[in-house]
Amino acid sequence: MGKKRKTYYLDEEIIQRVKTHAQQQQISENDAFEQAVFIYEKFYEHANQYIPISKEFQPLLLEAVDHMIYQSERMMQTPYPDPLLAQNVQDSLSARIAYLYEIRKVLTDTKNG
């Protein structure tokens, strides 16, 4: 017995975006649609973890993230007398800065997109 096929009703704009994604990733359109459905289902499962942000607040959030990056980079330059503590702080701050840059990228992409 074959796999039961699901039917989804999508706007033409969404269909075109998925097809464009398939071309960019050099994958089949079917694989692209399967990825899109998988992402949607995962998001739906965890939707209570996300809070929508109004576009009017994005510049303020971007400014706050930039400030946190700046402060974290300044803290990286702070000398610590204990080398072990210094290494732990450096590792922690490096991870924090990388995460803040990810957040910044999302805010920037959302702002421009």
Image: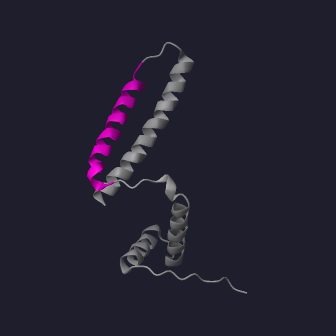
Please state, as top left, top right, bottom left or bottom right, where the N terminus lies in the image: bottom right
- Image x and y of residue 77, in percent: 39, 23
- In-front residue for pair 82/37: 37
- Image x and y of residue 25, in percent: 46, 67
Residue at image position (43%, 37%) is 97
- Image x and y of residue 58, in percent: 30, 50
- In-front residue for pair 90/12: 12
In this rendering, is residue 109 above or below 35? above
Q: Which residues are magenta?
A: 54-78
**Residue extending farthest front:** 48
Answer left or right for 81 relative to 77: right
Quarter of the view holding residue 78: top left
Answer left or right for 90 relative to 54: right
Examine the residues drawn in magenta and state their main secondary structure: helix
- Image x and y of residue 45, in percent: 56, 61
Magenta stretch: residue 72 in it? yes
In this rendering, is residue 108 above or below 95? below
Residue at image position (54%, 57%) is 46
